[in-house]
Amino acid sequence: MSWAEVYPWEPPAAPVVRGVYGQVREAILSGALAPGARLPSSRDLAARLGVARASVVSAYEQLLAEGYAVGRPGSGTYVRADLSGVLDAPAAPTPAVAPAPGLPERAVRLAATPVPPPRPGERTFNTGRTLMDARAQAAWSRSARRAVRSLSAGDFGYADPAGDLALREAIAAYLRAARGVRCEADQVIVTTGAQHAQDIVARVLLSPGDAVWAEDPGYPASLRILEAVGAQITPVPVDADGLVVSEGRRLAPEARAAFVTPSHQYPLGMALSMARRLELLAWAREARAWVVEDDYASEFRYDGPPLTALQGLDGGQRVIYVGTLNKALFPGLRLGYLVAPSALVEPFRQARRMMDRQAPTLTQAMVLDFMQSGEFAAHIRRRRVAYGAQRDVLVRALTERLGHRVEVAQPDQGLHLVAYLKDGLGDQEAEALADANNVTVQAISRLYRGAAPRQGLLLGFSGFPVRAMAPGVARLARAIG
């Protein structure tokens, strides 16, 4: 299987042939397209780049001539399996030094941690929902059947706490191609989701009283994890460029970690600017701190290719990358992953073993088959189009029906949006009014800890088809309009 289908190809600059050649060559040299990977057909790549097919053919001919690619009659063009003559192996990153783990008493803090009440899942515009079309459901069923048939005696016993090696190899290959993450399979640890991954990180790296940066406003589940281990949370404000790193330095320069959502800040939606990314990494190196990158909705960017992960800029030294398949597929799947710096792999692996021993063997086999069959990449492409359409219809309906009451921030990524309230209406009051009209929205003011809260409503759009948007907005308009 080739990850060329999800690689973020970009229209080339002039001269076109040289631009196409350089882009494909860079994907090969960086390892995003592995030896033996199939390149897109010249016709397909030309359509994606918006260039003439003859330009792609010329670029491929140059790659063939220089030994980067090989042609297989009747099959296509492939990255050459043996690149020893043209490709030097990248230097191994310098191992990071992990701080000693702590074992704090947590029972009292856990008992005091508030648990939010469940929200009716079928109501628009609840979050934590996704959709699978008929093709994906049929493919998932086939993967499930093949996974069951493929079970061997070894699958009925205990397995590696880090996860099935073949699945970790598939995840690593996907992350290298689609997110620019620099990792190998042995750095990947399969978890039940992003929260589980963050819990592992917190248990291993933080002791009671350790200062930790957290975005303000931020993801409440991450804050509950930090509170449970006794960390001293330092709320760091965000602005249009994301986390204000200078404020973090001022408030807690010696913090042990920073928990961030750089590609799509939760809940407000902005991306961390490149200047802030470099500033954050510089602080982490100076303070010997860890950056926990929660890339919770990276697959779904609607206005351009996915942003390169912060971990890719860092080279895997101080950044712990956290991702999830639960939003890419469906929340009930309960599979995610973290990518650990080399020095932290074994501590995280042991922590994962002590929690619940391993991820389910059968579920991992199903996901592996779904990825290897090519259906995962195809599903992501289709969902990106569908979710983008759902977002657009929701924005239009909110603007038409409630433009006098809300200002809509249209996100270029993610599975939710924020509608900021006008005319002095409080968001918690609006939340209660919506609930009485069978609409689920979330008041964002609750997500602030130190900064002055804005009044706005968080609306999820990924779990509801286009046809559900207008009726949902109509009910919301009756509630607050």
Image (tube, rainbow, N blue to C red):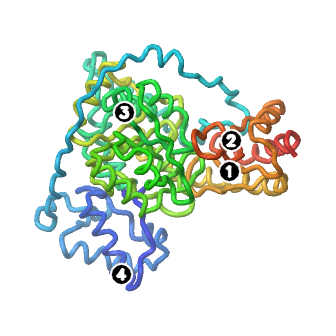
Q: How far apart are marks 2 and 1 (CA)?
A: 8 Å
Label 2 or label 3, whichever comes before in sequence order: 3
Q: Distance between the residues labelled 1 and 4?
A: 37 Å
x then y, percent, for residue 452: 64, 46
Label 3 or label 4, whichever comes before in sequence order: 4
Pick whichever, 234 or 262, lies toward us. Answer: 234
Left or right: residue 134 versus residue 428 is left
Left or right: residue 419 versus residue 304 is right
Q: How far apart are marks 1 and 3 (CA)?
A: 42 Å
Residue 140 visible in this rendered orientation of the protein: yes
Q: Which mark is residue 464?
A: 2
x then y, percent, for residue 377: 45, 49
Q: How crowded is mark 1: few (under 14 residues within 10 Å), some or many (20 or more)?
A: many
Is residue 453 placed above or below 154 in the rendered structure?
A: below
Badge 2 marks a residue whose secondary structure is loop
Which residue position is annotated with label 3? 210
- Do labels 2 and 4 touch, CB within 8 Å? no
- Do labels 2 and 3 touch, CB within 8 Å? no
Which dot, 1 or 3, sits closer to the camera?
3
Pick whichever, 77 or 411, lies toward us. Answer: 411
Which dot, 2 or 3, sits closer to the camera?
3
Which residue position is annotated with label 1? 390
- Do labels 3 and 4 touch, CB within 8 Å? no
Pick whichever, 196 or 100, lies toward us. Answer: 100
Amino acid marked by disc 1:
Gln
Amino acid marked by disc 3:
Asp
Label 2 or label 1, whichever comes before in sequence order: 1
Which residue position is annotated with label 4? 17
Q: Which residue is drawn at 65% across and 49% down?
A: 417
Q: Residue at x 42, y 56 (%)?
A: 6
Identify the image quadrant of residue 144: top left
Is residue 258 placed above or below 271 in the rendered structure?
A: above
